[in-house]
Amino acid sequence: MKKNMGTVDKVIRILVAVFIGVLYFTNVISGTLAIILGILAVVFVLTSFISFCPLYLPFGISTFRKKIR
């Protein structure tokens, strides 16, 4: 798996996941919406940790920058 997510992309995804978690634990969202957003939050966290988004692949999107040495 080739990395295709940059640092800013990962931070935004984690912040969105945390926001969804806060909404859930403060009972702002519930039911089906909570389940769907919860799954989305888990996917965001997982893709952030592995720096790879499968949806970027077919579109050729990459926010990852290689470090120049």
Image (spheres, rainbow, N blue to C red):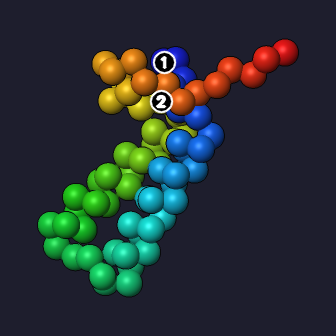
Q: Locate the C terminus by quadrant.
A: top right
Residue 49 at x, y percent in the picture: 55, 40
Answer left or right for 26 relative to 15.
left
- Tag 1, which secondary structure? loop
Question: Does the residue at mark 1 contact the one at mark 2 (Cβ under 8 Å)?
Answer: yes
Q: Is residue 10 placed above or below 54 in the rendered structure?
A: below
Q: How far apart, in angstroms, are the residues tagged by discs 1 and 2?
A: 7 Å
- Judge from the rendering whether residue 36 lies leftward or rightward of residue 17; answer left or right: left
State the residue position of label 1.
Answer: 1
- Residue 65 image-quadrant placement: top right
Residue shown at 45%/59% (left/top)? 16
Label 2 secondary element = loop
Question: Extreme right residue here?
Answer: 69
Q: Quadrant of residue 28?
A: bottom left
How many C-alpha atoms fall within 10 Å of the one at disc 2: few (<14), some, or many (≥20)? Answer: many
* Residue labelled with disc 2: 52
In x, y percent, where is residue 48? Answer: 51, 42
Q: Image check: 8 left or right of 29?
A: right
x then y, percent, for residue 34:
24, 68
Q: Nearer the viewer, residue 4 or 42?
A: 4
Identify which residue is drawn at 22% across, 58% down. 36
Residue drawn at 34 percent across, 75 percent down:
24
Which residue is at the far left?
32
Say if 58 sits above or below 56 in the image: above
Q: Residues within 10 Å of mark 1 (few under 14, many from 20)?
A: few
Q: Earlier in the sequence, mark 1 or mark 2?
A: 1
The amino acid sitting under disc 2 is Phe
Q: Amino acid at mark 1?
A: Met
Who's the residue at 59% across and 44% down the image?
8
Disc on res. 26? none
